[in-house]
């Protein structure tokens, strides 16, 4: 969950009648992760299974519950079969968002960890047979 910052500031001013100005600010900042949808034709380089999930992560800033900026965007493909996580470029991530039927070459995917070896027959997270 994003961090919530409350900043209270009081500034003395000679021009005001009441002697001060109060300011109240609510904002948040933090890492966020959003599912962008399935990529049905993309084969997993780890297990060979077709069909992966596109994930976008970013550092978000907001003020008064309105999003202001998304910084450090990264895109990942996650295989539901072997739990493999593969990082892709920002351009490839945007391409897959617009055209989920597209297939990226294997050299566009960089291993980001989390996958089972090809000979493993069990999910590394829950132990369920694959």
Image (cartoon, rainbow, N blue to C red):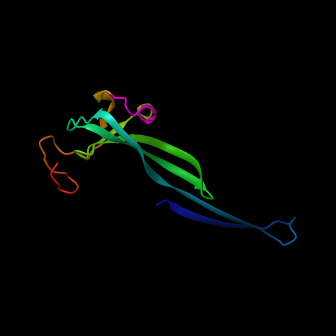
Q: Is residue 84 left or right of residue 4?
A: left
14 sits left or right of 38 in the view: right
Q: Which residues are magenta?
A: 93-104
- The x and y percentages for residue 31 are 46, 52
Residue placed at 21% from the left, 35% from the top? Answer: 48
Is 99 contained in the magenta span? yes
In-front residue for pair 106/13: 106
Q: Based on the displayed image, in which of its 4 quarters is residue 20 positioned?
A: bottom right
**x, y (%) of residue 99?**
42, 31
Residue at horizontal 15%, vertical 51%? Answer: 129
x, y percent for residue 44: 25, 36
Residue shown at 84% from the left, 72% from the top: 18
Quadrant housing residue 81 = top left
Q: Does the magenta portion include 96?
A: yes
Q: Is residue 18 above or below residue 53?
A: below
At 29% from the left edge and 38% from the top edge, which residue is drawn? Answer: 51
Q: Which x, y percent locates residue 65?
A: 60, 58
Q: Is residue 56 above or below residue 96?
A: below
Please tell me how many numbered marks the rendered image carries. Answer: 0
């Amino acid at each position: 969950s994003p961090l919530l910052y409350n900043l209270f500031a009081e500034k003395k001013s000679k021009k005001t009648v009441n002697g001060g100005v109060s300011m109240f600010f609510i904002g948040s900042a933090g890492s966020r992760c959003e599912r962008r949808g399935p990529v049905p034709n993309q084969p997993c380089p780890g297990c060979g299974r077709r069909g992966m999930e596109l994930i976008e992560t970013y550092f978000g800033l907001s003020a008064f519950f309105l999003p202001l900026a998304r910084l450090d965007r990264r895109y990942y493909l996650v295989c539901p079969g072997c739990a493999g996580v593969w990082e892709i470029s920002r351009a490839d991530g945007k391409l897959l968002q617009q055209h989920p039927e597209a297939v990226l070459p294997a050299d566009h995917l960089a291993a980001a960890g989390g996958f089972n070896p090809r000979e493993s027959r069990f999910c590394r997270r829950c132990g369920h047979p694959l």
